[in-house]
Image (tube, rainbow, N blue to C red):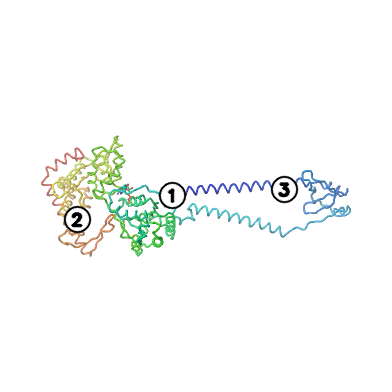
Amino acid sequence: MDLNQNNQNKDNKNDKKNKQGMFFVLATTIITTFLVLGLLDFAGKATTKEISYNEFLNMVEEGEVAEVIIGDNQLTIKPKSETENVLLPGIEMTYYTGVVKDEKLTERLDAADVKFWSEIPDTASAVFWNIMLSVVLPFGLIFFCMSYLMKKMSKGGGMMGIGKSNAKMYVQKETGVTFKDVAGQDEAKESLQEVVDFLHNPKKYTEIGAKLPKGALLVGPPGTGKTLLAKAVAGEAHVPFFSVSGSEFVEMYVGVGASRVRDLFKQAQAMAPCIIFIDEIDAIGKSRDTALGSNDEREQTLNQILSEMDGFSTEKGLLLLAATNRPEVLDPALLRPGRFDRRIIVDKPDLKGRVDVLKVHSKGVKMDETVDLEAIALATSGAVGSDLANMINEAAINAVKNGRKVVSQSDLFEAVEVVLVGKEKKDRIMKQEERRIVSYHEVGHALVSALQKDAEPVQKITIVPRTMGALGYVMHTPEEEKFLNTKAELDAMLVGLLAGRAAEEIVFDTVTTGASNDIERATKIARAMVTQYGMSKKFGLMGLESVQHRYLDGRAVMNCGEATVSEIDSEVMQMLKDAYEEAKRLLSENREAMDKIAEYLIEKETIT
Ligand code: ADP
């Protein structure tokens, strides 16, 4: 169950209770006030009575009045005869009447021997009450309301709660994921198995005097299962899993990230043993000494993480896992022993790994006997775990679309194509001439690949346009997974890539824009052969480029002077020219076969 939700539920309940209490207190106060006022009113009415001025004068003349208090607005009259109150026995009745301009009143009272006086107003207490009511009470009310609102806001994570990370942090008490759910990645699992053991019984390690690791860094391309592995560690160790993305720490305000980090560690320590997982840690962990684009907020956040990591003791079993696909940009301080000192590589899966991932994800999917996951794995070299999971799902959806109850191999191949080159665009109508050009172009690729002994076998040729821009394509399937490419294979690749353009030139005596992607890929290969693989005669084994961001796009940066760069360009140009000539030669020699296949392709659209 989501712990956050749990807390929220509790909060809600508390809120409700508070509200009920407040309401109760308010209601009782109001009712009591009314009761008291009512009683006072009743008592007042029962013990006093208004009379007319005539009646009062009569009473004075008759000698029935004992005392008169002369006020500003009223005369209070106490009678001589003790007329007992009927309703409230023991309490005397008094009378009152309004003040009438009567200059002879004092004479009359004096003559009737009545005691009379006027009360001196109590100015001090009147001023006190005035101040209380007009100043203290309103301010008190305002203060009370403000403090109540502030409390509410900070609870709800509003303006006053910027520094709290509970809004976005994601806590799972039990992830429910185990190592079995992570296919392949055996080396990573092996390293993490140790970590699971620490979390299980930290004592075993501390007793002997070993220090437990504080953090491990999962490094690899996107979609290879880093998050999944971190969850599996938590699941295997049966400990809570705190997950937060590096970018969530960094806010517009300086200092917020740092306070979020503090908050995160505080919460995690309260729940230890547990795992904190920081995804995309490069968002905050970038090296601090990059002069350009230095960022105070990011640095403060990073510093806070560093100091928190030094601060917590591992004996409780708190472990940090972080994931990144740009380990080279991370700050060295983050990687030193005692922090993220373990680096676990989670790379793209190899053939066996891909078969395993396909197996894991096809567990709940009904498949018929034609399905051969091995063949799918062979065709998807370079795909990561999330691609493969996606493919299985696409295949299942495809089967349902076609009204079938089980997934077949053709569904899977279709899904592979959808993930790699996009969906078929069946409604696009191409002109006959364009179809001819596209089919000769594709046949050119396929035929040259077939003619060269070092090229990969062709699985499929098609001229059905795809949503990702291809008008047609040739699919190669290697017979087995390769980890190395020989120079002969790379040369064959160059010739194969340029053969599409060569076919256009030979058949139509003109060239089209359709070869742009081929040219780009061929140039990239040729350049790498010259600058990285030491496969050119001119430069020999000189390393002229190095690869950056190995786990992302793998862009290369030049390591040589400007003069050399232009020489590299001319070398690459020569290689591409040679490859193009070779392609043209091969196709011209096999013109008949090319015509036949192209005619067939125009008619059938797809050849397998
Ligand atoms: P990363 O964090 O490396 O970017 P994720 O762990 O989020 O990748 O993986 C995304 C999804 O891809 C997972 O939820 C899972 O379905 C699938 N996946 C990736 N790698 C594997 C694997 N080795 N085994 C099983 N499934 C995987």
Which residue is label 1 attached to? 3
Q: Secondary structure at mark 3?
A: helix
- Residue 394 in the image: above or below residue 146: above
What is the spatial separation of the Cα atoms under label 3 and label 2, in whole angstroms? 104 Å
| Ligand 1 is within 8 Å of the C-beta of the residue at disc 3 | no
Callout 1 amino acid: Leu
Label 1 C-beta lies within 8 Å of the nearest ligand 1 atom: no
Q: Quadrant of residue 487?
A: bottom left
Disc number lying in front (3 or 2): 3
Which residue is denoted by mark 3 in the rendering?
40
Which one is in front, 17 or 78?
17
Q: Residue at x 14, y 40 (%)?
A: 596
Q: Which mark is residue 210?
A: none
- The secondary element bearing badge 2 is classed as helix
Q: Is residue 195 left or right of residue 66?
A: left
How far apart are the alpha carbons under marks 1 and 2? 55 Å
- Of 260 and 75, nearer the camera is 260
Q: Amino acid at mark 2?
A: Ala
Residue 300 at least partly seen:
no
Residue at image mark 2: 526
Q: Secondary structure at mark 1?
A: helix
Task: Give the x, y percent position of residue 82.
Answer: 83, 48
Q: Residues within 10 Å of mark 3 (few under 14, many from 20)?
A: few
Separation of marks 3 and 1 at Cα, in angstroms: 56 Å
Q: Quarter of the image holding residue 331?
A: bottom left
Could you say where residue 383 lies in the image, as x and y percent from the top left?
26, 49
